[in-house]
Amino acid sequence: MQEFLDQGGFDDLLAFVAVADTGSFVLAAQRLGRDASTVSRRVGKLERRLGVRLLSRTTRRVALTEIGAAYHHRLQAVLDELNSAGRDASERAATPQGLVRVSLPMSFGRLWIAPLIPGFLARHPQIRVDLRTTDRYVDLIEEGFDVAIRVGTLPDSSLTARRIATYRSRLVAAPAYLARRAAPQRPEELAEHDCLGFTALASWPDWPLARDGERVTVRPSGPLVSDSSEILLLAALEGVGIGLFPDWLAGPPIGEGRLVEVLPGWVGTIEAGVHAVMPPGRLVPAKVRLFVDDIAEALKAGWRW
């Protein structure tokens, strides 16, 4: 079957059906936007492939043979089914419905995306969502995900990406820590403090910082390092030391007074993004586009940090 289609077999079928429907090579050619000689060659090619005569030709008319009439009847049923499938696909794309499989980073997904899902489902009852949380980069195509939410700087790839939020990293500590230790006044003074190291940070073991065009890089040290930002945040909340955290993570406890910004104005040098990443291709299913649009708007409305 595949070899048949690869050799232009589908065009041959369409040519035959057009001639059978119109009873004329000229009218069939007009329907297909081809010339009559091309249509005739395609029908002849189909007959040779099948080893049967489908049409009886005279100088005045073209008629179906008995085999041709039976073949046309079965082909028409197939083409009707193809047209029905196409309409169904278009309608499903136009009316968002079905399952959206989403990959989320664990901390960001729990804090910022998960609270938005109930509202999305209430607004779009025809859509179901399958959320999977992991901090590894999933293969969207291989693992069958429609979209992944990713934070940080994206590597170059063929995937389609849309930035839905931006953030910076800030130095913070608990009031209890700053009650024991005088707050640093310059980045260089961080070397004298207990610092919490996030080993998954792209610049680790350094903290590149910037303020109003001024840049400096410090190398922190302290009692705890981890590849989990949430573990380090818990330690910071308990007064263990100073941490450099993305503001989407540190912002809520800052707002609650449980953390205090250290060296205000000094932030991580990289303005990173929150991205919705989708498989490559121009046609994004309506259900996926709606999910990304809805989450982006809801995130924007609550993005205070």
Image (cartoon, rainbow, N blue to C red):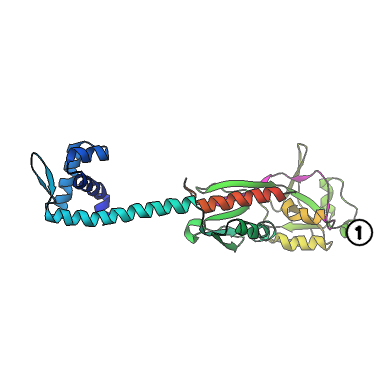
Measured as percent of width and height from the top left, residue 267 is found at 76, 45
Name the one closer to the observer, 300 or 275.
300
Determine whether, in the image, residue 114 is placed left or right of residue 72: right
Measured as percent of width and height from the top left, residue 106 is found at 65, 61
Determine whether, in the image, residue 130 is placed left or right of residue 30: right
Q: Is residue 118 magenta?
A: no
Please give the residue where the numbered disc 1 appears in the rendered image: 180
- Residue at point 20%, 39% (across, down): 38
Q: Is residue 267 magenta?
A: yes
Determine whether, in the image, residue 2 is placed left or right of residue 109: left
Q: Identify the secondary structure beneath mark 1.
A: helix
- Quadrant for the N terminus, please: bottom left
Measured as percent of width and height from the top left, residue 226 is found at 71, 62
Determine whether, in the image, residue 177 is placed left or right of residue 113: right
Name the one closer to the observer, 158 or 196.
158
Q: Residues within 10 Å of mark 1 (few under 14, many from 20)?
A: few
Q: Is residue 3 visible?
A: no
Q: Is residue 125 visible?
A: yes
- Residue at point 77%, 63% (across, down): 234
The span shown in magenta is 256-278
Name the one closer to the observer, 207 or 125.
125
Q: Residue furthest left?
A: 58
Name the one closer to the observer, 211 or 104.
104
Q: Amino acid at mark 1?
A: Arg
Measured as percent of width and height from the top left, residue 2 is found at 28, 55
- Residue at point 76%, 60% (across, down): 233
